[in-house]
């Protein structure tokens, strides 16, 4: 049975890598680790503005990860 994915792993779509690219996997894993760190801090925060800033950071990390994967799989 597969282990349950972390929030970050789900947020970056870690299990979706149709090409089986090692680079895509590496980029997604690094992004998932960052997202998990932000999510953990967001859960601990008591200030709503701090929670919002962590949420923005997570969204921007997802965007950066998607562009990085696009670059890694680009075929000219």
Image (cartoon, grey):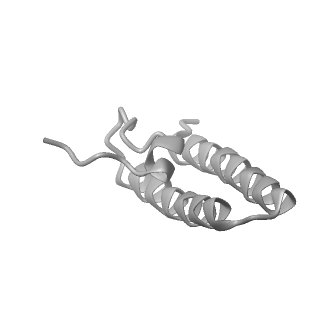
Question: Residue at the location (60% across, 50% down)?
Answer: 65
Q: Is residue 32 above or below residue 59?
A: below
Residue at the limit of the structure toward the top, as seen here:
18
Q: Is residue 39 above or below residue 15?
A: below
Task: Residue 75: give x, y in percent of width and height.
Answer: 54, 36
Task: Residue 34: give x, y in percent of width and height.
Answer: 57, 64
Question: Residue at the location (31% across, 42% down)?
Answer: 20
Horizontal relation, residue 46 to residue 71: left or right: right
Task: Residue 48: give x, y in percent of width and height.
Answer: 82, 56
Question: Residue at the location (58% across, 36% down)?
Answer: 76
Question: Residue at the location (74% across, 57% down)?
Answer: 57
Query: Which residue is nearer to you in this view: 65 or 4?
Result: 4
Q: Is residue 34 above or below residue 62?
A: below
Query: Which residue is nearer to you in this view: 5 or 48?
Result: 48
Horizontal relation, residue 16 to residue 45: left or right: left
Query: Which residue is nearer to you in this view: 5 or 25?
Result: 5
Q: Quadrant of residue 47?
A: bottom right
Query: Which residue is nearer to you in this view: 47 or 5?
Result: 47
Task: Residue 69: give x, y in percent of width and height.
Answer: 55, 45
Residue at the limit of the structure toward the front, as seen here:
46
Horizontal relation, residue 17 to residue 61: left or right: left
């Amino acid at each position: 049975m597969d282990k349950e994915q972390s929030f970050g792993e789900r947020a970056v779509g870690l299990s979706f890598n149709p090409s089986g690219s090692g680079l895509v996997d590496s980029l997604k894993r690094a992004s998932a680790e960052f997202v998990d760190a932000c999510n953990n801090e967001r859960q601990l925060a008591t200030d709503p503005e701090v929670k919002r800033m962590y949420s923005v950071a997570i969204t921007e990390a997802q965007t950066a990860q998607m562009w990085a994967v696009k670059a890694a799989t680009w075929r000219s």
